[in-house]
Amino acid sequence: MGASQSALRALRRTRPVVAAAPLVFSRPTLQWYCEGPKQLPLQVTPELPEPLHALPTKEQRVLAPPPEFKERMVSAGSLRNIVLLGLTGAGKSTLANPISCTMAFKSGDSMTSVTQEVQHQEFEYNGEKYRVIDTPGFFDTTMTHEQVAVALDQLAKVAKEGLVAVIVIVKDGRFTEENEAVIKFVEAVLGSTAVEKYSMLVVTHTSKSVSKLQEELASLPEGHLGRTMASKVGCRVLGVDKAFWQWPPYKTRTNVMSHVEEILKSNDHTAIDCDVMNWGARIKKQLELEFEMQTAGLRKQMEDNRRKFEENQRLMKEAHDNDKAKFMEEQQHLQIENKSIKELLQKTTDEHSQMLKEIESEKLNVARQLESMNTSQQQLQEQIRRMHEAHEQRLDQMKFDYEMDKQREMRANQLVPLPRQQFYVERHGSDSSEALALATGALAGAALVGGGCNVQ
């Protein structure tokens, strides 16, 4: 216990301050090329512009604003979501099966991601309802930024009740830059507070205890990725044996879920709020930043061409009369190039505006769906109430018919029954005019059925 406590203190002292990594949602890179005019055999030849490239060939990475961290209370009996993150082949799907005590998740040992979209499975543990969510390899090179955006949207919709725990899986205890990118990804999407309060590391293929892992991580040198990652998640580390896929998975499930319950308890039963609208706003802001950066190069090149155009005009005035026609030809080439730049800038602006309209339309559709669901729920509750009232009325009628049949049978056997008048008075009250009327009608009916027997 002493070594474990000292290891925890050492990790907490060295917890770094980490800025959120950039979240990239860049559109497919396009490239435009405008060929410059051919050089003419002049004594004075102006410098021609470089070939025009509207967008760089590499992906644009810009810093999005840090996400707004939100929390929500987890009420008793509500569904609690656990999300698994990690590199392709780290064992997310393999660990999701013992956690949910099912075989609902497909797993494989190849470097190609088996999980292509967000999967989830509900289960119960200690009387509470949980949902484990398996995610695709967000860091797989085969996934485009559009696919990552779609997967994030699926995750937000599945975990609409909030996330109580974020489990980052590290295979074989290999702390690499790719594994650190998983932590930075969580910081970029959910915020650094979510990493500190709700995240934990699960090291697979190891039989070491929690205290032993914490002690080893604390003994690592400053700046080591393993020590940095452990300090970011608040020193919450769990080792899972290499045979954790064996069935039944009681040990693995108990170890993981006990840590989840500790996270939930330490956060006063709160969860990370997965706000679809908030994420959509961040994506919109991301697109605006990328648009500004992409068009900045176009504007700069237009300014360079303008200066070169002015320089060409000065050279034309200084050149001999027989060279003026050649300078005019070069000037026309520059004007054509400027025109193409303007057209390209206008096209990029129109595409950006259309994309913003699509995002706004999607937000309105989500709002309408939520409103429709609330209306349907109210109508269903009203139908249940009406069915309950009809059931109560039918039950009263059946009781009344049963008493009438019983009276008829007793009179047929010449027995003395409980007076009908007393039955209705006890049911409806002695002061009710309706009770007296019903009792009188019932006695008259009984007299006819009983063949004229005297009624008490």
Image: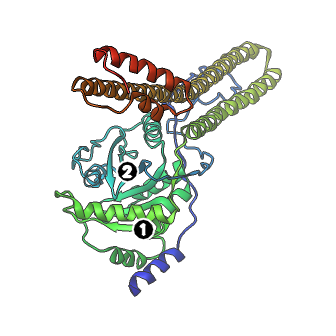
Residue under numbered circle 2: 130
Q: Position of residue 307 (x, y in %)?
A: 76, 30
294 vs 354: above or below: below
Q: Give the residue at x 37% y 26%.
A: 400
Residue 289 or residue 198, whichever sits in front: 198
Secondary structure of the residue carrying numbered label 1: loop
Residue carrying label 1: 236
Q: Is residue 15 left or right of residue 212?
A: right
- Of residues 422 and 78, the one drawn nearer to the viewer in this rendering: 422
Residue 230 in the image: state x and y as whole percent: 44, 68
Residue lying at the far bottom of the rendered structure: 2
Q: Does residue 57 appear in the picture of this structure?
A: yes
* Residue 359 found in image quarter: top right
Quadrant of the drawing holding the N terminus: bottom left
* Position of residue 402 in the picture relative to residue 165 (left or right): left
| Side of 218 where 48 appears, left or right | right
View extreme (left): residue: 247
Reply above or below: 21 against 232: above
Considering the numbered disc 2 on the image, is that residue within a helix, a strand or a loop? strand
Q: Could you classify mark 1 by the number of other residues whose Cα lies within 10 Å: few (under 14), some (14-19), or many (20 or more)? A: many
